[in-house]
């Protein structure tokens, strides 16, 4: 059944490379049902992959047939992803916490051959036409076999699809980001070259499997021959349980969105002093509010804080160390230069490549790790995979990120916000990120979100802030005066509301749509 030749880029081959060199090393350390830590060696993980692959291969699936995997990150789910990769079956990860409507919409869109659920998940109404299976350490059990199909392909090629990740669809219906083996393998090789993860690292992942930040953690940990430590979702809600787990598992690197750290920083930052073995923190997904980042840096002296920037359409673009110490007047975080083998350029409104320090433009990414396209959506694909603005004639496509940045003195970039967060207020271009950055400079404010709330046929600029201690109070008048001094008049919020916490999306980012609805509701 060997379908992947050793010379051909394949995610399975890259991540199971350590089996040949360190088979007994733990690939995954996870909590069992009683909370005790259990190890899965690279050899055992590979055996699980082979076992799952044998069952999948027996179903007569063809290269390119999709498998929806509904699970959190675990040794079993990682093994299933790799079994799919080995057979050229694009995996489509969906979190168990995803609402039924989202699961149904993904099943309707990708028309998978099989929907595999981790054992122990409550059974959701399956879609009749799709094969279904349960999987766990004891094996992959097919409940309803997929419909028979003709096998047209013989080999799995580097250009074949490794996975399809559906974006949260914050701006409309979710789009399926199609990533090839060649793109993800090339990206992970760049991560190895940049030394983000060392073989003796124990890398904690905290994102849901449907978010490519989780795939990133799996990829960099296993490609480096390090150990992946998935943090159980239940442990993320309580600062004490989260820190306790990271300590017990002797984690050296933690991956998570900025909001992961908000509870422990507000409730009991000293808990973090227990993490003596922690070497680095990688955060990604959105801006880390600077006051919180400063608190994290002070609480974890000597720990490397890395700002991971980028989009699922290339997995990521840059990894930049947070300046240590963060200068007092630091207003925006650097996203630096692209990782090795890629390059970010800044493009102006007339499509010209910007080179003058201080200018603002849209980030375009030149990279061999770009996605193949959006699933079944050639128009949306053509809008973001565009001819290189520097020289359209050679036909190379680059990723138009939709992100705005400012060019620093040495070509490094400073993230400013999404171009679709750029709103027009009384004819003026407004960066919501700029308003939020100003609000977080207010004493006692630890995080902020600004949004345009529809009101009486117009829009009103409003803001919500989270304070650094539950019992703190905000002097709204003083806050508005501060904004009037710091920002142009049209960027001063009409009102500022203190909220106990900012609403989050399934992937842990600030849910601006939900916040807008809350602020629009009559007080
Ligand atoms: N460090 C940031 N500062 C500020 N805005 C950001 C940042 N990282 C993303 N973003 C924003 O999020 C958008 C991409 O969203 S996404 O497609 O869901 N992907 C992600 O959020 C995570 C990303 N694939 C990733 C995975 C693994 C490592 C690093 C990065 C970017 O275009 C940015 O607008």
Image (cartoon, helix red, strand yellow):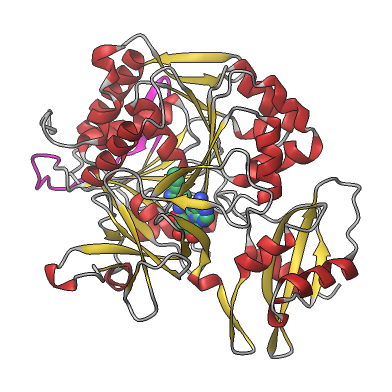
Which one is in front, 144 or 111? 111
Which quadrant of the view contains residue 84?
A: top left
Does residue 74 show up?
A: yes
Magenta region includes residue 139:
yes
Q: Work out whether 139 lies above or below 402.
A: above
Q: Residue furthest top?
A: 24
Does residue 35 show up?
A: no
Which quadrant of the view contains residue 36?
A: top right
Name the residue: 9% across, 48% down.
152
Q: Is residue 195 left or right of residue 34?
A: left
Q: Is residue 56 left or right of residue 468?
A: left
Q: Quadrant of the C terminus?
A: bottom right
Image location of residue 76, percent across then percent down = 42, 26
Name the residue: 41% across, 32% down.
196
Image location of residue 5, percent across then percent down = 10, 31
Magenta region includes residue 283:
no
The part of the chain drawn in magenta is 133-156
Report the number of numbered marks: 0
Q: Quadrant of the N terminus?
A: top left
Image location of residue 112, percent across then percent down = 32, 50
Q: Is residue 27 left or right of residue 29?
A: left
Image location of residue 432, percent across then percent down = 62, 69
Name the residue: 59% across, 20% down.
33
Name the residue: 29% across, 47% down.
66
Q: Work out whether 435 lies above or below 164.
A: below
Which one is in front, 468 or 520? 468
């Amino acid at each position: 059944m060997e379908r992947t030749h050793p010379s051909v880029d394949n995610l399975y081959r890259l991540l199971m490379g350590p089996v040949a060199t360190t088979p007994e090393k733990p690939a995954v350390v996870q909590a069992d049902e009683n909370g005790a830590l259990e190890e899965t060696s690279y050899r055992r993980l590979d055996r699980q992959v082979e076992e799952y692959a044998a069952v999948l291969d027996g179903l007569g699936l063809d290269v390119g047939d999709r498998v929806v995997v509904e699970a959190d990150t675990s040794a079993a789910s990682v093994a299933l992803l790799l079994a799919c990769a080995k057979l050229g079956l694009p995996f489509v990860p969906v979190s168990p916490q995803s609402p039924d409507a989202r699961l149904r919409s993904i099943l309707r869109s990708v028309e998978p051959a099989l929907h595999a659920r981790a054992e122990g998940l409550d059974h959701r109404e399956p879609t009749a036409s799709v094969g279904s299976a349960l999987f766990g350490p004891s094996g992959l059990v097919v409940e309803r076999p997929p419909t028979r199909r003709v096998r047209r392909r013989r080999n799995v090629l580097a250009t074949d699809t490794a996975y399809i990740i559906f974006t949260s669809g914050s701006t409309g219906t979710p789009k399926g980001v199609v990533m090839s083996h060649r793109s993800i393998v090339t990206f992970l090789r760049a991560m190895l070259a940049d030394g983000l993860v060392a073989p003796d690292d124990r890398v904690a992942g905290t994102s849901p499997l449907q978010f490519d930040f989780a795939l990133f953690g799996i990829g960099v940990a296993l490609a480096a021959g390090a150990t992946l430590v998935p943090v159980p979702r239940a442990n993320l809600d309580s600062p004490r349980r989260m820190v306790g787990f990271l300590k017990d598992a002797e984690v050296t690197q933690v991956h998570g969105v900025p909001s992961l750290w908000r509870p422990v920083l507000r409730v009991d930052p000293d808990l973090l002093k227990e993490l003596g073995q922690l070497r680095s923190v990688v955060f990604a997904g959105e801006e880390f509010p600077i006051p919180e980042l400063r608190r994290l840096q002070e609480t974890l002296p000597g720990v490397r804080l890395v700002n991971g920037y980028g989009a699922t359409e290339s997995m990521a673009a840059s990894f930049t160390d947070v300046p240590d110490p963060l200068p007092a007047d630091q207003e925006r975080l650097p996203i630096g230069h692209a990782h090795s083998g890629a390059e970010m350029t800044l493009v102006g409104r007339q499509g010209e490549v910007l080179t003058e320090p201080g200018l603002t433009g849209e980030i375009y990414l030149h990279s061999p790790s770009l996605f193949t396209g959006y699933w079944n959506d050639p128009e949306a694909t053509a809008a973001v995979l565009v001819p290189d603005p520097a020289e359209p004639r050679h036909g190379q496509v680059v990723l138009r990120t939709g992100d705005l940045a400012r060019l620093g003195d040495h070509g490094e970039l400073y993230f400013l916000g999404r171009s679709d967060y750029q709103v027009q207020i009384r004819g003026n271009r407004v960066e919501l990120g700029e308003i939020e950055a100003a609000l977080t400079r207010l004493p006692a404010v630890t995080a902020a979100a600004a949004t345009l709330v529809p009101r009486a046929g117009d829009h009103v600029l409003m803001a919500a802030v989270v304070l650094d201690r539950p019992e703190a109070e905000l002097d709204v008048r003083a806050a508005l005066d501060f904004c009037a001094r710091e920002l142009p008049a049209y960027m001063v919020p009409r009102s500022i509301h203190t909220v106990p916490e900012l609403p989050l999306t399934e992937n842990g980012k600030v849910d601006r749509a939900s916040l807008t609805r809350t602020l629009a509701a009559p007080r």
